[in-house]
């Protein structure tokens, strides 16, 4: 015969075990471990990403400060370009039946820039503008064009040091070139240009005298 006291003991043991089972949150216990593991992984990943970003920035700085072009140029005397263009314009005005053809040499353009830190290099079928932008060396390939009867330029590519850069980076250098050319070549405003060619170290502009 079963003893009633044994039943009471069994009931107490089952109650005790049941309380332990209900009080132990296995999901919460392991979840805390998993959360801590995820936080550790996140921190390590963040540190690695920051290290890679820092290394990338250092690489960009080194490449940007590398001088990809020789900027030590010896420009001819200031005003030479204006004098040369003026002489060509004067000759065109004498012969009213001829098409106006004006050549502007590489050295004349560099003279108009008036800076040893910015230069133009006219190569075969392309024109390179080199100068400093915020302390870094920028190399800009530009294509001369005629816009509204006057000389202008399209930006083909830009590099900072050895790295490609957005075209907007070239804006200060391009603005400097346009301004210097306008100031040094006011005589060109009397000609309505319709074509421009790249010659041997020179630009060749073609057009007609305004009002002719």
Image (cartoon, rainbow, N blue to C red):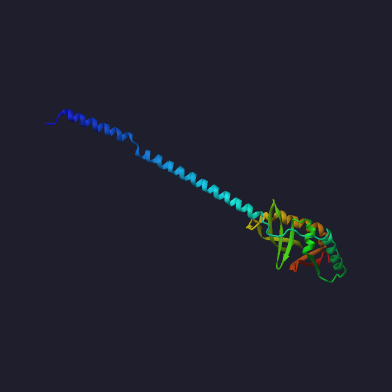
- Where residue 52 sits: x, y (%)? 55, 50
Q: Is residue 148 visible?
A: no
Q: Is residue 171 above or below residue 145?
A: above
- Where residue 122 sits: x, y (%)? 73, 65
Q: Residue at x 27, y 34 (%)?
A: 17
Please count the marks in the image: 0
Q: Is residue 135 visible?
A: yes
Q: In the orientation shown, which residue stands out farthest toward the top?
A: 5
From the viewer's perspective, tell me whether residue 143 is left or right of residue 56: right
- Between residues 18 and 116, which one lies in front from this camera angle? 116
- Between residues 166 and 67, which one lies in front from this camera angle? 67
Q: Residue at x 81, y 56 (%)?
A: 183
Q: In the orientation shown, which residue stands out farthest toward the right?
A: 94
Residue 141, image quadrant? bottom right
- Where residue 133 sits: x, y (%)? 70, 53
Q: Quadrant of the C terminus?
A: bottom right
Q: Residue at x 78, y 61 (%)?
A: 109
Residue 9, image quadrant? top left
Q: In the orientation shown, which residue stands out farthest toward the bottom?
A: 97
- Between residues 17 and 187, which one lies in front from this camera angle? 17
From the viewer's perspective, tell me whether residue 153 is left or right of residue 101: left
From the viewer's perspective, tell me whether residue 98 is left or right of residue 199: right
Q: Quadrant of the N terminus?
A: top left
- Between residues 80 and 96, which one lies in front from this camera angle? 80
Q: In the orientation shown, which residue stands out farthest toward the left?
A: 1
- Where residue 163 sits: x, y (%)? 63, 57
From the viewer's perspective, tell me whether residue 97 is left or right of residue 41: right
């Amino acid at each position: 015969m079963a003893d009633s006291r044994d039943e009471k003991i069994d009931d107490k043991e089952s109650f005790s075990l049941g309380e332990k089972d209900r009080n132990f949150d296995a999901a919460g216990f392991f979840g805390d471990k998993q959360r801590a593991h995820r936080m550790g992984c996140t921190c390590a990943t963040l540190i690695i990403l920051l290290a890679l970003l820092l290394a990338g920035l250092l690489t960009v700085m080194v490449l940007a400060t590398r001088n990809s072009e020789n900027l030590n140029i010896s420009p001819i005397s200031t005003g030479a370009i204006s004098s040369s263009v003026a002489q060509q314009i004067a000759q065109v005005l004498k012969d009213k039946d001829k098409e106006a053809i004006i050549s502007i040499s590489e050295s004349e353009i560099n003279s108009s820039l008036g800076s040893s830190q910015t230069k133009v290099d006219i190569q075969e079928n392309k024109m390179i503008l080199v100068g400093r932008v915020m302390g870094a060396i920028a190399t800009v390939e530009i294509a001369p064009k005629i816009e509204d009867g006057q000389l202008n330029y399209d930006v083909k590519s830009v590099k900072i040091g050895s790295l490609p850069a957005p075209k907007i980076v070239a804006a200060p250098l391009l603005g400097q070139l346009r301004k210097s050319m306008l100031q040094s070549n006011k005589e060109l405003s009397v000609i309505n240009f319709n074509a421009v060619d790249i010659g041997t170290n020179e630009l060749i502009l073609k057009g007609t005298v305004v009002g002719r």
